[in-house]
Image (cartoon, grey):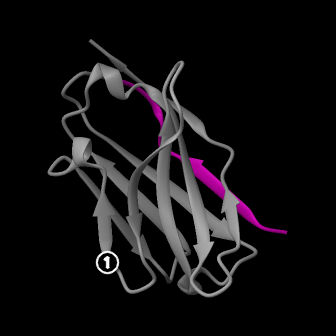
Amino acid sequence: QVQLVESGGGLVQAGGSLRLSCAASGIIFRNNHMGWFRQGPGKQRELVAVITTEGNTNYADSVKGRFTVSRDNAKNTVYLQMNGLKSEETAVYYCRSSHRITGAMYWGQGFQVTVSS
């Protein structure tokens, strides 16, 4: 059974920082690209950042320079360091795995990040 369990969310003031974690089980982590997504109130789910199996990263333009995605294959965990948070980044944040060959995807349950202005 595949599980992606996110943690680290919560309430932070604008300009503050949070570090999100997503621990995976039931998959061969090193064979999966990992991504972070978010869905704000009344908005569509959007890509925030991805990190490939080789450690290459890509970010949404809106977070470049403020967010950093990383992974620890030994711990089957992907991280998202978020600095300089803005109130409009209040959203439910999700992690997602995507197998590098089959494309099979799994989602975490998501959790709330609230940025107060």
Residue 32, x across and y down, in percent: 57, 78
Is residue 93 shown above or below 74? Answer: above
The picture quadrant where one finds residue 42 is: top right
Q: Residue at x 53, y 39 (%)?
A: 45
Q: Is 10 situated above or below 28?
A: above
Q: Residue at x 48, y 61 (%)?
A: 35
Q: Quadrant of residue 83?
A: top left
Q: Mostly what secondary structure, the magenta segment?
A: strand
Which residue carries the number 1 mark?
56
- Is residue 2 in the magenta section? yes
Q: Which residues are magenta?
A: 1-12
Q: Is residue 20 magenta?
A: no
What is the x, y in percent for residue 41? 52, 19
Does residue 77 appear to the left or right of 68 in the view shown?
A: right
- Tell me: 111 left or right of 61: right
Residue at image point 48% right, 37% down = 9
Whole-percent x and y of residue 3? 74, 62
**Residue at far front of view:** 44
